[in-house]
Amino acid sequence: MSEIQESTLCGHCTECKYDCCFSNKNCGDSHIFGLLTPEELHTLMDNKRQIHFRSGETILKQNTPLTHLVCIKSGLAKVVSEDPKGKNLILQIIKSNSIFTAGGSIVDDFRHFTVAAITDVDCCFIDTSRLYTLLTKNSGFAIELLKHSNSQHLKMLSTLINLSNKYMPGRVADTLLYLKNNIFESNPFDFVLSKQELADMSGMTKESFIRSLKEFEDSGLIHHSRNSIEILKENELVDISKNG
Amino acid sequence: MSEIQESTLCGHCTECKYDCCFSNKNCGDSHIFGLLTPEELHTLMDNKRQIHFRSGETILKQNTPLTHLVCIKSGLAKVVSEDPKGKNLILQIIKSNSIFTAGGSIVDDFRHFTVAAITDVDCCFIDTSRLYTLLTKNSGFAIELLKHSNSQHLKMLSTLINLSNKYMPGRVADTLLYLKNNIFESNPFDFVLSKQELADMSGMTKESFIRSLKEFEDSGLIHHSRNSIEILKENELVDISKNG
DNA sequence: CGTCTAAATTGACATTTATCAATTAATTTC
DNA sequence: GAAATTAATTGATAAATGTCAATTTAGACG
């Protein structure tokens, strides 16, 4: 399923520091690693593994043991909750320069969802046992990780509310706005996701997603082709997201 | 809306330690406070306020400033996400002896949901600024709080999956099993929740909930009266939860 | 270029769920 | 304890969403 290509280990932290996602400066998503001393950073860097995944490959698999934390250096990945019956739900798209704890780190020992590469992805694997050691030594670091965890928590709450309180048009609008404003940050945006994946982000079947998209197109709210969507009337989409 | 009766402040920690929910021994849900030194515990205890709420009262209100963390000493409370359009979703029932961070503590400054008393509730309010001070001093404490946060995160993930991947019978089965096994821990169980509230826990209207319950009754899976439900065939309910 | 394959789209239909109105049962209030 | 209020239930219906099958389109590959 996932063919892992391990790169060489990183030897010199001071050299690689600004070249990888552990660096405070590069890690746009948070300041988690900013509070570590050079020695502490070294502890993490020392055995980090930087790995390349090709588009489509599984990076982390649901229900496998949780031994490493992942930091995405470049590329896009999707966080998928896999259902026994095959109903997948895409919870989040991960951009470059964000770290990802894969659910129940610290609480239990296995991963609660799958992470798969959407584009080619370069990422680092951090040994969680080294991380835990640092947590006990550096409380500022622990607090940053707590902030990160709570922040993920709130995102998930928002997803839950969106999915359970809204009808399809509202959910589709949410997905489109999320992709434009949070992930691709351009308009129109070209996407590497299939309609099935967009539907999995919106909690519906691909047929329903397509029909909803077509209604938006017919109403002049968006323009879409196979791999690109342009939002023409964002205000109206926001209204649909709020009211539906 | 909520008429708050403040009790006297706690003066002597060593005395009240085993009488309130901060105590390691009483806080069944977690060991969060177990790692604090007596002095640190004192810092928290010193200004704690123990407050009584009557059934139905709002304990914490969504969108208000987050200044205190709440620890439930006795009684039951519900965690509700309130929707502008009035579609409420009950995310969780809180039992006695559990602490509750109300969403985005540390991340932002307001509460992301409402907590309301189902029965009479005695609870303590802990000043979050004192909590944060302790976090920086005691990394073990920070790690415990991180565990608690991640654990809440996983519960929410499970709720999200249940609500978005299952049809009504599966969601009703989930609610019944949750109440029996996690909240009331008896069978039959008497509940203080209205059918509307049970429906709000299951992400559906009260009419749909009642119809689903009736089908279970007709199939001999449960027996229910106004304020009590007995689960007769738990295995079959578990199957329905898994498959539907 | 034509063939093959996977994705996207469309249509008809079945199922699930919500809505609305009416009725009954329980609880509170005087 | 009768009247008034609230919660629970039922039925009829409409709306939302999923399912299945068929068709079209776009890319990949020889």
Image (cartoon, coloured by chain):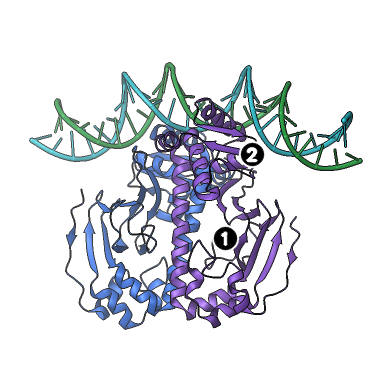
Chain colours: A blue, B purple, C green, D cyan
Q: Position of residue A2 (x, y in %)?
A: 21, 51
The first of marks 1 and 2 along the sequence is 1
Task: State which chain disc 2 sits on.
Answer: B
Number of numbered labels in the structure image: 2
User: Residue type at mark 2?
Assistant: Asn
Q: Secondary structure at mark 1?
A: loop
User: Residue type at mark 1?
Assistant: Ala
What residue is rendered at 64% in x and 67% in y? B124
* For residue C5, above or below residue A19: above
Q: Is residue A212 visible?
A: yes
Q: Which residue is mark 2?
A: B227
Task: State which chain disc 1 sits on.
Answer: B
Q: Which residue is mark 1?
A: B102
Q: Quadrant of residue A14?
A: bottom left
Q: Quadrant of residue B39?
A: bottom right
Q: Residues within 10 Å of mark 2 (few under 14, many from 20)?
A: few
Q: Position of residue B63 (x, y in %)?
A: 63, 58
What residue is rendered at 44% in x and 51% in y? B157
What residue is rendered at 36% in x and 82% in y? A37
Q: Residues within 10 Å of mark 1 (few under 14, many from 20)?
A: many
Q: Quadrant of the C terminus of chain A?
A: top right
* For residue C2, above or below residue A83: above
Q: Secondary structure at mark 2?
A: loop
- Toward the viewer: B62 or B1? B1
- Toward the viewer: B47 or A185? B47
What residue is rendered at 56% in x and 61% in y? B97
Q: Quadrant of residue A29?
A: bottom left
